[in-house]
Image (tube, helix red, strand yellow):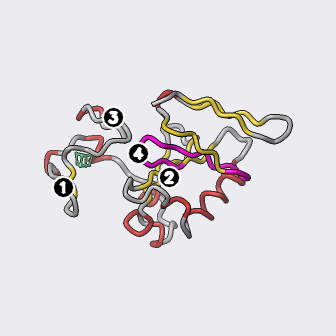
């Protein structure tokens, strides 16, 4: 995720990450880092098996709650496709498709749109530029995204 206070763009590792240890400036980390809560933390009913260190996926939402984003550890870019995460993402896509809500997976700058049918590889995109998702009459899906 982008951290404005650090000038850190989305999709790149923070300079303060200490591999295997965590945040190298934990006591003076920016407010955005202090206050961030992933969906697993926010939802008390979400089982332990969805905890990010188990799945290698941080579940995140946009500010309006319209996007559910499965942000994968770049070392495990396909982590969103593994059980139990994939079934949960697909279920959410089925439940919300057509309502304006969408389900995405990301690894670094690469993103996928998860639909009730196919999963669409969007390539490297700038999600902060927004996404326009349209379902055509034949059921296929068109996506316009800002390029990274
Ligand atoms: S918590 Fe620490 S390592 Fe993580 S983004 Fe914030 S400053 Fe960087």
Residue on which the image places disc 4: 108
Distance between the Cα atoms at labels 1 and 3? 18 Å
Percent across and percent down for residue 72 are 44, 54
> Eyeballing the image, is 117 above or below 55?
above
Percent across and percent down for residue 112 are 57, 46
Q: Nearer the viewer, mark 2 or mark 4?
A: 4
Q: Quadrant of residue 5?
A: top left
Q: Which residues are magenta?
A: 105-118
Marks 2 and 4, the one that precedes in the sequence:
2
Residue on which the image places disc 1: 18
- Asked if the beta carbon under badge 1 is closer than 8 A to the nearest atom of ligand 1, the reply is yes
Is disc 1 placed on a helix, strand or loop? strand
Q: Quadrant of residue 11?
A: top left
140 left or right of 39? right
Packing grade of label 3 (10 A; few <14, some 14-19, many >=20) is: few
136 left or right of 95? right
Packing grade of label 1 (10 A; few <14, some 14-19, many >=20) is: few
The quarter in which the N terminus is drawn is top left
Q: Which mark is residue 9?
A: 3
> Eyeballing the image, is 86 above or below 111?
below
Whether the residues at callouts 1 and 3 have beta carbons within 8 Å, the answer is no
Packing grade of label 2 (10 A; few <14, some 14-19, many >=20) is: many
Q: Residue at x 56, y 69 (%)?
A: 84
Distance between the Cα atoms at labels 2 and 3? 18 Å
Marks 1 and 3, the one that precedes in the sequence:
3
Q: Residue at x 63, y 49 (%)?
A: 114
Q: Residue at x 70, y 51 (%)?
A: 118
Q: Residue at x 55, y 42 (%)?
A: 65
Instruction: Determine the residue located farthest toward the right in the rendered image.
Output: 138
Marks 3 and 4, the one that precedes in the sequence:
3
């Amino acid at each position: 995720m982008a951290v404005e206070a650090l000038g850190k763009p989305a999709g790149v590792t923070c300079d303060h990450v200490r591999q295997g240890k965590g945040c190298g400036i934990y006591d003076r980390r920016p407010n955005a880092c202090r206050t961030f809560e992933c969906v697993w933390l926010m939802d008390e009913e979400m089982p332990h098996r969805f905890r990010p260190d188990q799945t290698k996926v941080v579940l995140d939402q946009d500010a309006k709650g319209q996007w559910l984003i499965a942000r994968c550890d770049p070392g495990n870019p396909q982590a969103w496709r593994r059980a139990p995460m994939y079934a949960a993402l697909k279920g959410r896509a089925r439940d919300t498709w057509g309502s304006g809500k969408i389900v995405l997976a990301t690894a670094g700058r690469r993103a996928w749109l998860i639909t009730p049918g196919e999963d669409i590889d969007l390539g490297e995109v700038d999600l902060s530029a927004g996404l326009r998702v349209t379902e055509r009459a034949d059921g296929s899906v068109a996506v316009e995204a800002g390029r990274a």
